[in-house]
Amino acid sequence: DTLNVNVPPSPNCAYPPNDGRLTTHAFFVPAMVTGTENEFDRLAHLLFRVDVHDAMSSTRQTMVSDVILLEYSRDAKEVDAAHSFYTAPNRLSDPPCDENGDELPMLFHLSSDMTAHTLGTPDKARAMREWFHKLDESKKGCTSVHAETDE
């Protein structure tokens, strides 16, 4: 349920964010997670060994899920957390440009709650398609931003 309008990976995916350390980009929600192969392997082993009762107690939850275990891992400093997403696509300016007229990076986590309550539809797939097309069209009013590399 991640809507990526215009954020490309680095050339050949050679430059993972945060120097390859496992990072969730929507705080501890696994909407987008980056890291090296070794980091994902490290997390898999870490989650296998987690004391589930400790994780529930420290996050004040009565169940576990991928979200709860990532929150627990973030609190234990085992996983880095960033906020790389905009809150909601309907809160962007139109056109979605910064103060210089440059296209903003557009990446959204469209949770079921957001699509139902913020965007007004329970049909997540339809909302994602509609917002992708709407933002893709709207960004034409901005200057495209391109990264330059030696490749």
Image: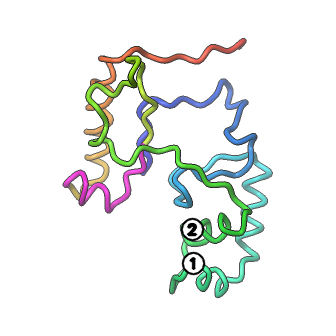
Kind of residue at badge 2: Asp
Along the line of sight, the residue nearer the viewer: 13 or 58 = 58
Q: Position of residue 68 (x, y in %)?
A: 56, 72
Along the line of sight, the residue nearer the viewer: 30 or 77 = 77
Outermost residue toward the front?
99
- Return the residue at label 2: 66
Helix, strand or loop status at disc 1: helix
Image: magenta residue range: 108-120
Residue 111 shown in magenta: yes
Q: Position of residue 6 (x, y in %)?
A: 45, 29
Residue 59 disc label: 1
Look at 33% across and 35% down and name the residue there: 132
Helix, strand or loop status at disc 2: helix
- Whole-Å distance between the Cαs marked 2 and 1? 13 Å
Residue 21 disc label: none
Look at 46% across and 31% down and name the residue there: 105
User: Does 80 appear above or below 5?
Assistant: below
Kind of residue at badge 1: Thr
Q: Which is in the foreground here, disc 2 or disc 1?
A: 1
Q: Position of residue 2 (x, y in %)?
A: 44, 47
